[in-house]
Image: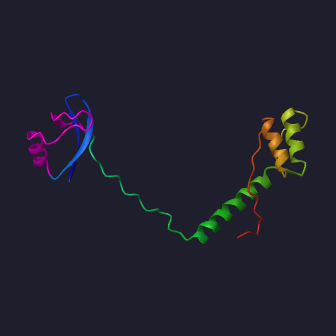
């Protein structure tokens, strides 16, 4: 079957299905096709966008088992933890207080790490004080 966008002389557009192009021509010449809006039988094919098949989805190159990908993720998180520990000061549960002091200029500017409650983190965000939450894995996590 062939699908055509059809148009009458009053520019009403509708679609029609035909077994072949010649069958459409025959039905149009015999005035067997009528516009469903106005009933006009002076119908011709309208300009249509080509029907293009969608490209097939490529298979993922990541065929590694989940356990392998999970182990790689933990390795990267441990590496990140090591870098943070090496390049920052641990202020523990005073993180929100220290971050605010650094932001306000009352403490020396430096990289810090620590813990904060959800409420303290929300307060820092509301005050525009920049910080980043990092997933902290144990050094022995697998």
At x 86% / y 44%, what residue is drawn? 96
In the picture, the quarter occupied by the C terminus is bottom right
Asked if residue 22 lies in the magenta stretch, the reply is yes
Q: Is residue 76 visible?
A: yes
Camera-side residue of 85 and 63: 63
At x 35% / y 54%, what residue is drawn? 55
Residue 124's x, y, as percent?
Answer: 82, 40
Q: Is residue 108 visible?
A: no
Dividing the picture into quadrants, the one containing residue 59 is: bottom left
At x 83% / y 40%, what residue is drawn? 123
Q: How is the image coloured?
A: rainbow
In the picture, the quarter occupied by the N terminus is bottom left
Camera-side residue of 14 and 141: 14
Camera-side residue of 126 and 4: 4
112 relative position to 36: left or right:
right
Give the magenta-colored segment's residue range: 20-48
112 relative position to 80: left or right:
right
Dividing the picture into quadrants, the one containing residue 66 is: bottom right
Residue 22's x, y, as percent?
Answer: 10, 47
Figure check: 142 above or below 135:
below
108 relative position to 43: left or right:
right
Dividing the picture into quadrants, the one containing residue 5 is: top left
């Amino acid at each position: 079957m062939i699908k055509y966008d059809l148009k009458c002389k009053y520019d009403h557009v509708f679609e029609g299905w035909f077994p072949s192009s010649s069958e459409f021509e025959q039905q149009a010449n015999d005035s067997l096709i009528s516009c469903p809006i106005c009933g006009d039988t002076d119908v011709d094919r309208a300009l249509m966008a080509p029907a293009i098949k969608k490209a097939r989805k490529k298979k993922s190159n990541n065929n590694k088992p989940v356990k392998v990908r999970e182990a790689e993720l933990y390795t990267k998180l441990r590496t990140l933890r090591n870098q943070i520990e090496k390049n920052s000061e641990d202020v523990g549960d005073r993180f929100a207080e220290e971050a605010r002091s650094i932001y306000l200029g009352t403490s020396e500017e430096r990289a810090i790490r620590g813990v904060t409650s959800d409420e303290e983190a929300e307060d820092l965000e509301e005050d525009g004080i920049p910080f980043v939450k990092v997933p902290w894995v144990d050094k022995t996590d697998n």
